[in-house]
Image (cartoon, helix red, strand yellow):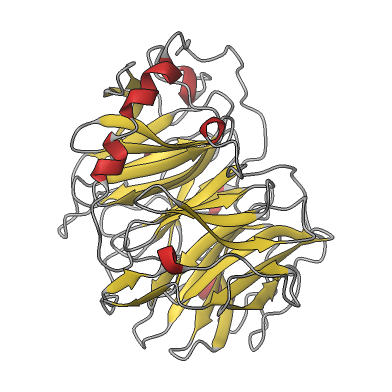
Amino acid sequence: MLRRMHSDPRRARRLGPLTATSRADGLATCRALGTSIPRRQVVRGGLASLAAVFAGRTLAGCDRDEVEGEVSDVRLHGEAPVGAFPPRSLPSPPALRSLVDAIEPLGPPDANGVRLPPGFTCRVVARSGERVAPSSHAWHASPDGGSVFPHEDGGWIYVSNSEVPRTGGVGALRFAPDGTLVDAFPILQGTSVNCAGGKTPWGAWLSCEEAPRGRVFECDPWGEREAVVRPSLGVFRHEAAAVDPVNAHVYLTEDEPDGRLYRFVPAQRTPEGHPDLARGRLEVASVARGGAVRWLEVPDPRFRRGVPTRVQVAESTVFRGGEGIWYHDGVVYFATKGDDRVWAYDVSDAKLSILYDRTAHSDDPIRGVDNLTVTCCGDVLVAEDGGYMRLVAILPDGRFVPLLQVLGQARSEITGPAFDPSGTRLYFSSQRGVARDGLTYEITGPFHAPA
């Protein structure tokens, strides 16, 4: 989420060890982690409280025609047809079991000002504006949404968005199999306010622009293919995206006070069964009082006729500031910051319920819900924008387990949580850190164990 647009004058434009032509416009990738444990029982349990949320709500949007704002130079990025991002042959992630329910309470802050449970350690792997050794690449300002992708050599790549106007994009950190940081490089440049995004089953990173005319860019984390703009996924103030690999749909959140929840239905699938992002139908959710969801087509998804996407369908449902979104085991989870809720959409039943509502938790609630990720075992990790500056796990049984807390950075936010393939290293950023310098961390400890 963008609190305040700003540029970091110290942010270098160097491209690292590769040539400008090979990484100038960049890319980013991702793969799902581990196995899954059903949690539909938890999802369905929240339907009763949903009726009260939508009772009496006006579903038509406001009359604000906000079309101004920072816009990326899309001339730098071409549209590509199906097949632009063929799947990579990557190692399958190991089967894991979650140990999150056994994590003990947080201890005192360490040397980095991070409170961790006993048995966990922390290191800073990148700082905004500083060279990431051993590369010559300077880490970007305002690190936001991120994800991890397994590498062919047994290592992994962590990608991170840069939420700055006009000079945003995506950076990547490459790790060896033993966890050594061996390279850093940009995979997307010249875009604007890249907030969150989403990993895809075919190994691409969808980087979302949080601008009034923001777009989604399909990126390659390896930096080997040029990023591609995907306007069929809508032109609006994007926050995040999640791919349903079964039905080949893409779900998208919108970071507006009167935002909407969207679904992209491709015109066709790729030969591997993935959605072809070049062509398709953008739909918007309309939610009934009982939680039943209808999907209505958006007539002008590319925002060509002057009417913002979110107000084109009068029956569509308002969501107060859409944030992180994630698909797991037939359920799409997403957060809304305006009311501090985490939602769960059961794809097969087309039903929406509330997984978390701050007003129902007066004792130590999660505040400023923002980025989301879901572990292999169904733990929903919620990052706080401000609030207590924590990363909190919501377990399948409904309990909360704080995983970490950053102290002394009250004006920042937790962003980009993602696990390495082993599930024992957790990456995240403090977007503005200390004195507006973003910090990207690695937490190591027993989050998971082999199944």
Q: Is residue 433 shown left or right of residue 274?
A: right
Q: Is residue 73 shown left or right of residue 203?
A: right
Where residue 248 sits: x, y (%)?
22, 47
Q: Is residue 446 shown left or right of residue 160?
A: left
Q: In front: 215, or 113?
A: 113
The quadrant of the picture occupied by the C terminus is bottom left
Where residue 234 sits: x, y (%)?
43, 35
Q: Is residue 391 visible?
A: yes
The quadrant of the picture occupied by the N terminus is top right
Q: Image quadrant of residue 349?
A: top left
Where residue 276 sits: x, y (%)?
26, 49
Tell me which residue sits at (68%, 83%) in the image: 136
Q: In front: 56, or 174?
A: 56
Q: In front: 187, or 59?
A: 59
Q: Image quadrant of residue 344?
A: top left
Tell me which residue sits at (62%, 41%) in the image: 71
Q: Is residue 57 shown left or right of residue 3?
A: left
Q: Is residue 298 visible?
A: no
Position of residue 82 relative to residue 116, above or below, is: above
Tell me which residue sits at (32%, 28%) in the image: 47
Where residue 206 sits: x, y (%)?
43, 54
Q: In front: 404, or 293?
A: 404
Tell me which residue sits at (69%, 68%) in the image: 114
Position of residue 38 relative to residue 423, above or below, is: above
Count of numbered tags: 0
